[in-house]
Every structure is written in C-alpha cells, then in structure tokens.
Image (cartoon, grey):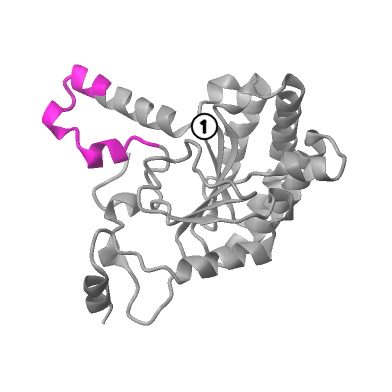
C-alpha cells in the first residue's frame, strides 16, 4: 500500500526537470525477446539462447545501475509462456533457479534490491523459497531496484488488484465510491515505484504482450531489431538517448509543454 505521496501516485508532468535538461527515465521496463531466434540462427537449441540471454541481463543491469536508473523491470516469463514446449519451460525454470542461487549475492554486494512480481504459486517450492530469500537479503539495499516479472501478466495484475478492492468493500473497510484510479494504483504490482517511463522491446516485435498494462499508461516505447542476447550496454544507452529526444506531453499540446519548460 502506498501513501498519497508515494512515488507512483505523486509522479506527474509537474515533477519534471527544469528547462534545458534531458531527463533519463526513472523506471525502465524491458521485454527481453529473441533468444530462440538468436540460437536458431546459430544452429543451437533454444535453451542455449536463453543461457546467452543471461549475459545480456547482466550487462543491462550493470549499465542501468551506472546510469542511476531507479527501477529496472525485466519480463522474464509471462503467464502465457507455460504454453511453450515442456523441455523449454523446464530449462527456463532451471535457469531461473540457478540465477537465484548464483546471482543474488552479487546483486547484494552492489547494493541492488531485487523483487519478483507475478503469480508465485505456479513455481516449485524451491523456486518460491529462493525468491523469498533473495528479496529478504536485498530488502534494505538503496541502489537500483531490479524487478523480475515471472509468471506475470498485466491482466492478472489488474484483476488481482480489483479483487482485493472488492474484498475490502465487502468487509466494510472501503466505500464503493472510494474505488478510483488511486485506489487501484495502490493495489497493483510496483505501487511504491515510479510508473514506467520507457519500455524497450528487443527482436523487432512491436507489441507489449500483456506486460505492465497499468504501469505503462504513459510509457514511451522503444522497439529495436536487436535480438536479446546481442542487447548490451551500448544498446541500452541508445534506448535512453531515444527517450531523451522525446517530448512527453501527458495530454497537453506542444505549445503548453514548451511554455511550461520555459
């Protein structure tokens, strides 16, 4: 739950930088796509592509921390990805568990806070245990907030938030007329973080695939043909530079934005 002055609820065009500055995004979300195509082009199995993608994850986390990005959310496994071949799903689960075992202490040493969003009930008891342990270990870190979206779907997130509000209304804790955007905002995932400023999708696909639907209401979208295993710090910098060239109007006209900037 967030207070009325939470980072998300308080974020608005009025909180922008002074004139002349080219702001970086506070919250970057990435749809990591193209592992299978990367592997296929090299005559490898899709599983090898996912392993190669881990190196790109490391590079982007490192660069995001260097650029002082507040929150980096990575779409690792969607609620629809269970439909993939069983051997690929099993390999992804093994890779996820391995990363939780091997990478978390490194993140902790660098002051990075780790959170996992999504329906954890779909994961094994071992994965759930390691998620809880990783979040507990890094909870008080004040550097980059790294969020892994796993077994996550934007519609699931909004439906869960609506159900929680309905339960509060039924319990007499909340009046029906109090159910508004702010109330729903406080119940969705990442309610304590700034809304997504920039969403990057790799591999040339141009859709958001049920990712952070609520949180990306005003996000700038950056699509790149680069396959995820080839996405590195330089590619991340190019996406940030693209964001800095955008004029974010939030419903206003160009003239209004320019007048406010002056």
Q: Which image quadrant: the C terminus?
A: bottom left
Pick the front one: 23 or 65: 23
Instruction: Pinpoint residue 172: horizontal percent, then vertical percent.
Output: 16, 20
Query: Residue 178 lies in magenta, yes or no?
Result: yes
Q: Is residue 216 above or below residue 174?
A: below
Q: Which image quadrant: the N terminus?
A: top left
Q: From the image, tell me which residue sits under label 1.
A: 152
Instruction: Pinpoint residue 39: horizontal percent, then vertical percent.
Output: 80, 42
On the image, which quarter does residue 103 sit in? top right
Q: Is residue 55 above or below residue 14?
A: above
On the image, which quarter does residue 177 sit in? top left
* Horizontal side, residue 233 vs residue 25: left or right: right
Helix, strand or loop at label 1? It is strand
Q: Residue at x 81, y 45 (%)?
A: 41
Instruction: Pinpoint residue 70: horizontal percent, then vertical percent.
Output: 49, 58
Query: Residue 115 lies in magenta, yes or no?
Result: no
Instruction: Pinpoint residue 253: horizontal percent, then vertical percent.
Output: 23, 67
Is residue 175 visible in the rendered structure shown here?
no
On the image, which quarter does residue 148 sit in? top right
Q: Residue at x 64, y 44 (%)?
A: 33
Question: Most extreme residue toward the right, as rendered?
Answer: 43
Q: Residue at x 25, y 58 (%)?
A: 251
* Horizontal side, residue 132 vs residue 20: left or right: right
Over which residues does the magenta segment extend? 166-188
* Horizontal side, residue 67 vs residue 43: left or right: left
Categorize mark 1 by other alpha carbons within 10 Å: few (<14), some (14-19), many (20+).
many
């Amino acid at each position: 739950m967030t207070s009325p002055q939470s980072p998300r609820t308080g974020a608005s065009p009025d909180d922008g930088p002074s004139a002349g500055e080219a702001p970086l995004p506070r919250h970057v979300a990435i749809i990591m796509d193209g592992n299978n195509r990367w592997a296929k082009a090299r005559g490898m199995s899709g599983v090898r592509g996912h392993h190669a993608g881990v190196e790109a994850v490391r590079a982007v986390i490192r660069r995001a921390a260097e650029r002082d990005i507040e929150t980096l959310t990575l779409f690792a496994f969607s609620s629809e990805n269970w439909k993939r071949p069983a051997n690929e799903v099993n390999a992804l689960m093994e890779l996820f568990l391995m990363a939780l075992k091997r990478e978390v202490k490194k993140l902790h040493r660098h002051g990075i806070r780790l959170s996992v969003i999504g329906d954890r009930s779909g994961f094994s008891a071992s994965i759930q245990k390691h998620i809880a342990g990783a979040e507990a270990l890094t909870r008080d870190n004040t550097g980059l907030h790294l969020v892994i979206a796993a077994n996550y779907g934007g519609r699931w997130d909004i439906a869960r938030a609506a159900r929680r509000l309905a339960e509060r209304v039924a319990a007499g804790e909340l009046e029906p007329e109090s159910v508004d955007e702010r109330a729903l905002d406080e119940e969705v995932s990442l309610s304590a973080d700034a809304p997504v400023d920039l969403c990057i999708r790799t591999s040339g696909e141009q859709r958001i695939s049920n990712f952070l639907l609520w949180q990306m209401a005003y996000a700038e979208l950056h699509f790149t043909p680069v396959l995820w295993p080839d996405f590195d710090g330089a590619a991340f910098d190019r996406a940030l530079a693209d964001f800095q060239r955008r004029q974010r109007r939030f419903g206003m006209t160009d003239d209004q934005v320019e007048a406010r900037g002056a």
